[in-house]
Amino acid sequence: MKYFALIPAAGVGARMAVGYPKQYLPLLGRPMLRHTVEAFLRSPLIEHTYVVVSAGDAYVADVLPDDLEGVTVLRCGGATRMESIRNGLRLLAEAIGAQDRVLVHDAARPGLTPAMIGKLVAEAGAEAAGGLLALPVVDTVKSTRGGSVATTPRDGLWLAQTPQMFPCALLRRALEEAPDPDAITDDASAVELLGYSPRLVEGHPRNLKVTLPADVRIAEMYLSMDITQ
Ligand code: C5P
């Protein structure tokens, strides 16, 4: 069984509002996408890394040059995250075997480390339903659905991170059969719709998703610290 990384990086990052896709934002002087890819390049477990960008992406060639070993850029991004991943998997039909594991990881999570990849593979690599990094909820959770404020017990609640790892055939089927691409904000939810229960493996706060301008400084703080976990 081999492990492959698939990084969707075809979003525009509208909430970051920097005038170009947020995955190219410099963090400690290096583009976010490069930090993200490095975690996989430094992991001895990963056979190869594939990065999905949009067809007209004008930045990726500088960040991931053609002669960078271990990574291939696929210019097949779609209108949603789910479609970008689905398009990538279609192109990789020959390259990745049905039982090989695919680790899908957001370009916008540059804090990932090889140690976290190792933990996910060690704890969920053999699971037929796959697994994902996630954080137990520590805050009290409030809901305003239905108009009035209500409190949801936090025990048993987790915040999903990436990588999310699945047997390639299962992930492919889940994304091909997902009823609504816009409703699928992570891969595990598509797999759950098929009746599978992926394993949750505790991640780390440094694997945050850089979404809003204020997240940039937090990501840089973690990147400057030597936390390998
Ligand atoms: O926008 P958000 O942070 O939720 O995006 C998560 C990941 O999905 C990012 O790495 C983004 O580049 C990617 N994405 C994509 N294709 C899209 C939309 C988002 O690859 N159409």
Image: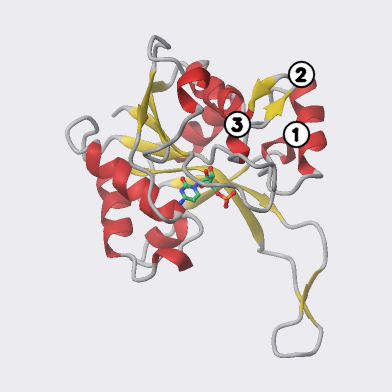
Mark 3 vs 2, N-terminal side: 3
- Mark 3 vs mark 1, CA separation in Å: 14 Å
Identified by mark 3, the residue type is: Tyr
Q: Could you say whether the residue bearing mark 1 is in a helix, strand or loop?
A: helix
Q: Nearer the viewer, residue 215 or 77?
A: 77
Mark 1 vs 2, N-terminal side: 1
Q: Nearer the viewer, residue 186 or 204?
A: 186
Q: Position of residue 186 (x, y in %)?
A: 49, 55
Residue, disc 1: 219
Residue, disc 2: 226
Location of residue 8 (image quadrant): top left
The mark lying in front, picked from 3 and 1, is 3
Q: Report crowding for label 3: few under 14, some 14 to 19, many 20 or more residues within 10 A (C-alpha).
A: some
- The yes-or-no answer for disc 3 within 8 Å of ligand 1 is no
Q: Can residue 43 be seen by looking at this rendering? A: no
* Residue 24: mark: 3
Identified by mark 1, the residue type is: Ala
Q: Can residue 114 be seen by looking at this rendering? A: yes
User: Relative to 7, is 118 above or below?
Assistant: above
